[in-house]
Image (tube, rainbow, N blue to C red):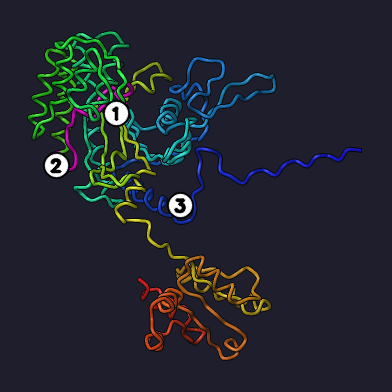
């Protein structure tokens, strides 16, 4: 009789495009999110924690009209008792769930509704270096007001968030533009075809890479790229392309100059003039709050997601330089973006509901803080209470409880206590600042030994014998003074 084949053991590996986060990373992220939440709360925004799973119909944006609607998201079909059921998916951002929540609960929510949300999102996209299928977002949105004061407030709040987490003034810039201005430019160009308008938007998005001359070529017949390949252009005449060039080069030395240039770029377009007026109002409101051009500025070259947004758009860019993987200097780049989207809730209600918001890229902002040396240092582990006699576990539990009650992070060694050296190795691996030792002799004499593990490691690595004598790293203190001595040692370690 043939033997049953054993099932192969599963591979212990993270799925492609995902990663695991360990202690220090989780702690750093939680601390940063707590600071951002504090700013959001100070501005009057309320926390919202919505479901990680939405119906495919509610998410909508990424999904093509096909039999298996899972492109861009992680989706599955759920069947009911009759064998029928709809498609569900993991959320790909925090804005689409907000639209569903507002549409569902709008009669119970205040108008405007100001909410912030933080959490993981999932995208079923091809992973790459630094590009994961699960990542954190940190959003704040105001739903139910068309006032551009809400847009100005979002920009001010984003500025405060960056400074609160440790990005100083001069190391960031929030840039503001308006989709309505671009609509006015398209109108001035005589472009009404949606396909051609989309081509113009994509070309504008390349301004930072190819410059004015490159955009002119791409709006016209086309151009050769760096590899020598020919890229077909949009096919506009020079006269048609001129408003786009005027728009992209309209940034002046101050807001007044930029606004004047933008008015010239939109010509007689009413929607374009409305967009310029909104930018002027935002600039005035920010100035009234003390946010100068060194922190927030008008910049027509910001084109992020202009197909999605309906009015003002904003992007937070970090301006300090870092070295890339090839050792070349480059600016860190964008860590947050957002804008006004007045049509998202309309999918549910049939009525246009004005909304504006911002989304902070948590992982990129954490990477920026590490670059600035604001986080990423050695994370202190817990004080370790060693176990010299397993029959006296109650005594050790009393000790660790006293230490914790004094507000000091501490743990008891729960491995095999037979080899004391292994206990100290464990404490070292945990990054422990100190170890508490109480053997039978210490118990009888009413004392404990406290080993300063940080100082001990420094002495072992650097000090001479004379310095060792002058700076002991292990202390014997009365049992009743254990907590006080630990506090003294930890304070000395900074």
> Is 322 on the left-hand or right-hand side of 472?
left
Task: Tell me which numbered mark, 1 or 2, is placed earlier along the sequence.
Answer: 2
Instruction: Give SS at disc 2.
Output: loop
Disc 2 + disc 3, Cβ < 8 Å = no
Residue 334: image x %, image y %?
Answer: 29, 38
Give above or below for 239 relative to 478.
Answer: above
- Furthest-bottom residue in this view: 445
Q: Does residue 258 appear anywhere in the picture?
A: yes
Instruction: Give SS at disc 1.
Output: loop
Task: Tell me which numbered mark, 3 or 1, is placed earlier along the sequence.
Answer: 3
Give above or below for 426 relative to 61.
Answer: below
Could you tell me how far apart the alpha carbons at marks 3 and 1 are, in whole angstroms? 30 Å
Disc 3 + disc 1, Cβ < 8 Å = no
Pointer 1: what residue?
A: 304
Report crowding for label 2: few under 14, some 14 to 19, many 20 or more residues within 10 A (C-alpha): few
Does the magenta stretch mainly form a helix, a strand or a loop? loop
Instruction: Give SS at disc 3.
Output: helix
Quadrant (top left, top right, bottom left, bottom right) of the C terminus = bottom left
Q: Report the front residue among 268 and 303.
A: 303
Residue at position x 78%, y 42% in the image: 6
Pointer 2: what residue?
A: 292
Could you tell me how far apart the alpha carbons at marks 1 and 2 are, in whole angstroms? 22 Å
Q: What residue range appears in magenta?
A: 287-311
> Is 117 on the left-hand or right-hand side of 142?
right
Q: Nearer the viewer, mark 2 or mark 3?
A: 3
Q: Say whether residue 407 is magenta.
A: no
Residue 273: image x %, image y %?
Answer: 15, 19
Q: Report the front residue among 271 and 238.
A: 238
């Amino acid at each position: 009789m043939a033997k049953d084949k054993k099932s192969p053991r599963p591979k212990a590996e993270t799925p492609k495009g995902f990663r695991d986060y360990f202690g220090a990373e989780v702690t750093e992220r939680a601390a940063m999110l707590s600071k951002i939440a504090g700013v959001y709360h100070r501005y009057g925004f309320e926390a919202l924690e919505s479901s990680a799973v939405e119906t495919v119909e509610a998410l909508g944006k990424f999904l093509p009209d096909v039999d298996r609607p899972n492109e861009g998201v992680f989706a599955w079909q759920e069947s009911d008792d009759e064998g029928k059921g709809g498609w569900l998916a993991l959320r790909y951002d925090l804005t689409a769930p907000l639209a569903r929540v507002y549409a569902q609960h709008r009669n119970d929510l205040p108008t405007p509704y100001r909410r912030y949300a933080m959490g993981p999102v999932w995208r079923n996209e091809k992973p790459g270096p630094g590009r994961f299928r699960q990542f954190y977002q940190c959003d704040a949105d105001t739903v139910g007001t068309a006032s551009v004061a809400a847009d100005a407030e979002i920009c001010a709040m984003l500025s405060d968030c960056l400074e609160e987490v440790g990005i100083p003034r001069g190391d960031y810039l929030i840039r503001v533009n308006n989709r309505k201005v671009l609509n006015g430019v398209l109108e001035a160009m005589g472009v009404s075809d949606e396909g051609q308008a989309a081509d113009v938007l994509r070309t504008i998005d390349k301004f930072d890479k190819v410059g004015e001359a490159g955009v002119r070529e791409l709006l016209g017949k086309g151009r050769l790229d760096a590899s020598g390949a020919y890229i077909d252009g949009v096919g506009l005449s020079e006269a048609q392309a001129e408003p786009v060039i005027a728009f992209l080069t309209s940034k002046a030395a101050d807001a007044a100059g930029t606004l004047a240039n933008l008015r010239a770029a939109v010509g007689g377009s009413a929607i374009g003039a409305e967009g310029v007026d909104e930018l002027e109002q935002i600039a005035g409101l920010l100035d009234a709050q003390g946010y100068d051009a060194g922190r927030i500025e008008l910049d027509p070259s910001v084109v992020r997601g202009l197909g999605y947004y309906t009015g003002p758009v904003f992007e937070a860019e970090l301006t300090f330089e870092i070295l890339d993987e090839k050792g070349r200097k480059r600016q860190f780049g964008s860590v947050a973006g957002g804008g006004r989207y007045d049509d998202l809730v309309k999918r549910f209600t049939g009525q246009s509901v004005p909304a504006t918001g911002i989304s902070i890229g948590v992982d990129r902002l954490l990477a920026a803080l590490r670059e600035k040396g604001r986080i990423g240092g050695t994370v202190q582990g817990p004080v370790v209470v060693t176990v010299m006699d397993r029959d006296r576990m109650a005594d050790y539990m009393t000790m660790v409880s006293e230490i914790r009650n004094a507000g000091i992070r501490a743990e008891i060694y729960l491995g095999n206590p037979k080899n004391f050296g292994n206990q100290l190795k464990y404490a070292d691996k945990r990054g422990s600042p100190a170890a508490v030792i109480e053997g039978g002799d210490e118990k009888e004499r009413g004392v404990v030994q406290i080993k300063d593990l940080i100082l001990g490691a420094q002495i072992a690595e650097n000090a001479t014998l004379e310095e060792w004598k002058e700076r002991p790293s292990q202390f014997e203190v009365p049992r009743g003074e254990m907590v006080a001595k630990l506090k003294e040692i930890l304070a000395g370690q900074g």
